[in-house]
Structure formats: C-alpha cells, structure tokens
Amino acid sequence: MRILLTTTSYQDTPGAHHDLLNGSGLEIVRARGPLSESDMLELISEQGPFEGTLNGDDAFTPKVIDALLPQCRCLSKYGIGLDKIDVAHCTSKRLPVLFTPGVNHTTVAEHAVGLMVAVAKHFWLHTSHVKQGRWTRQTGKELMGKTLGVLGMGRIGKEVIVRAAAFGMKTIAFDMFWDDAFAAEHGVERADSPQAVLQRAEVLSLHLPMNEQTTGYLNSERIALMPDGAIVVNTARGGLIDEAAVAESCRSGKLYGYGTDVLDAEPIEAPHPFKEIDNIIITPHVGSRTFESVERQALRATNNLINFLNGNEDYIQANELE
C-alpha cells in the first residue's frame, strides 16, 4: 500500500514515529507541506494513487479529495485542526478523516503564555536591536493582576488558564460547552457572550475553531470593544483575525501588541502588514513543535493510519459515516 506523507514537523523531528512508519511495510511518498490545491493535484497525478495520507495543513479541497478517490481509504491528520480539510465533502464521499486530539495542548499552552510574556516585555524589539548593536530599552508591563480573556475553553484554553494563574492573572472565559467543574476549581468567571470577554480582557487568548462563523472574528469593530492597550495572543488559526485591522490597532496603540503563531496564509507572504510593526511578534506555526509533542502527535497519527488500513479499530475518527 502506498501512502503520502506531507507534514514537515513529522519528517524533521526524530523519534519513534519514524521507526513505526518505516516498519509498517507501507510504501511512502514524501513531500514538503503545506501544499496548495494545485500542488496536491499535481502530486496525485504524478505519484498517485495513494491508499492513505499522513498530512498536515495541506489543502484537501473537493477537487483534491475527488482526485484521491476511489483508491484513498482515509486521511490521517497530524494534529487536530481540520479547517484545511473539507470534512463535509469527505463525509459525503464516505472517506474517513482521522485526527489526534489530546496530544499537543500542553505545549501549545506554553507557547501562548510565552507569547504573552514576549509581547508584554517587547522581546522582539529588544532582542533584534541588541543583535544590531543597539541598546534600545522600552518599558514593558506585568501580567500579574491583569484580566485574561479566553475565547474557547477547550483543552488548550484550559491549560493556558492554569498557567496564567501562576502569573497572578484572573480569567474570564466564554465557551459554548462550559465546564463547570474546571471553572470552579480554577476560579474562572463565565461570560455570557464573547463580547463580554472582549470588553474585559486586558490579555486575550484565542482558542476558537476555524469555521464560517469565526473567520475574521477579531475585526476593527470587536477590537474597539476591548480595553485600550490590550494584548492579543493567537495560537489557534490565523484566519480568526482581520490582519489589517490588527496591524492598524497595533500601530495606533489601541492594542499594546499582538503575538501569533499562525497566519491566514502560511508561510508568510510578501508584502505583509505585520512585517514592519515591532509590537507584533510572529512565530512560524511552531506552538506544538516540541520533541515531546511531535512524537505524541506523530505516533497517534501513524497508528491511526496503520491501524485503519490493517482493520484494527484503534484509531480516532473525526467524521461519522453512515
């Protein structure tokens, strides 16, 4: 059986997942993602067919999915975010989509808190200037005592809340599926709407899923609701924000700064509104890219694929097929 492997962090990070895949007996075609629709179609045409994929954030559009069929038996996503996969189309074509929930929440939460500190203390300006031989010093702000607003209190949002408490932050959050026990244990105030979080958040951490309702969610109108000088951190999806609006708010001082691990289009395009703004810190979608997390995700994604193809029921499927 031939499979397509595209996820780069899987390929670039050593670990037991390589031994597992190499010992599976599968024929592996390797490519460097994330791949666009045209790249995927060309790859399938030239090197397919494939009975399965181990993919990252490649474009699995209806055209790509149709090109993979009928030979492809499943898509195994390395990670949990499925916004690059047309899951509804997969479901209509009875193509299982496998994924890896519960494997990267701690490391992404660490990254989110790291971005909060980096923005609050002007890490980008300070480190870049010092390396240029300049001793520029800009006064920062403490996180202690600040109100943390969390939109999306899932696994990652909860881990951010736990870590923020160590900084002496208090949290207000909104989630459609509220966890009363967790909120009570960690002193989280429940907001009755996302807008109520925005109005109070001195530091905002985004953990929303990417869908039609949340695309471009943080726009100029919603930023206007926030306290002046607020910090926004995004380790979810770049498309959750209006990049032009965030850039302008950081320039004007309405936002103290923006720290993100994700962009609407990745890799970063040129020109990009964030490039020349010192109070915007960007990391290249590495929030879950630690040796520990990569191996956990990769082993789960690989076992999902191998087990599914071999008829073993130990796999995690995102879509229900009738």
Image (cartoon, grey):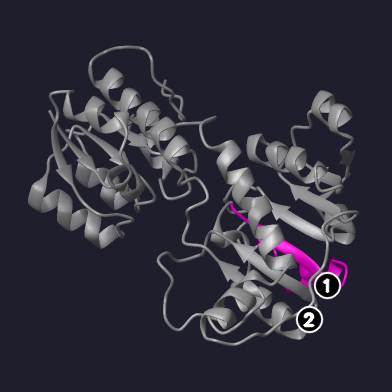
Residue 204, located in which quarter of the rendered image?
bottom right
The image position of residue 275, as x and y in percent, is: 53, 80
**Residue 168 location in percent, x, y?**
87, 47
Tag 1: Cα neighbours inside 10 Å, few (<14), some, or many (≥20)?
some
Question: Left or right of 190: which side holds 124?
Answer: left
The quadrant of the image that shows the C terminus is top left
Q: Do the residues labelled 2 and 1 touch (CB within 8 Å)?
A: yes
x and y percentages locating residue 259 in the rendered image: 64, 64
Instruction: Write the residue at 77% across / 73% down.
Output: 256
The image quadrant of residue 202 is bottom right
Question: What's drawn in magenta, residue-wise?
Answer: 217-235
Q: Which of marks 2 and 1 is nearer the N terminus?
A: 1
Residue 222 vertical position relative to residue 61 in the rendered view, above or below = below
Amino acid type, label 1: Gly
Relative vertical location of residue 3 with respect to residue 216 in this rendering, above or below = above
Q: Which mark is residue 118?
A: none
Q: Is mark 1 on a helix, strand or loop?
A: loop
Mark yes or no: residue 139 visible.
Answer: yes
Q: What residue type is labelled 2?
A: Gly
Give the alpha-carbon distance from disc 2 to disc 1, as whole Å: 6 Å
Residue bearing the label numbered 2: 253
Query: Is 127 placed above or below 314 here?
Result: below
Q: Inspect the magenta stretch and tell me whether residue 174 lies in it.
A: no
Residue at the spot 15% in from the left edge and 43% down from the top edge = 29
In front: 109, or 93? 109
Residue 12 screen position, x and y as percent: 30, 48
Asked whether residue 219 is in view, the answer is: no
Give the structural element (helix, strand or loop) at label 2: loop
Which residue is most to the top?
312
Is 14 placed left or right of 139 in the picture? left
Neighbours of disc 2 within 10 Å: few (<14), some (14-19), many (20+): few
- Report which residue position mark 1 lands on: 229
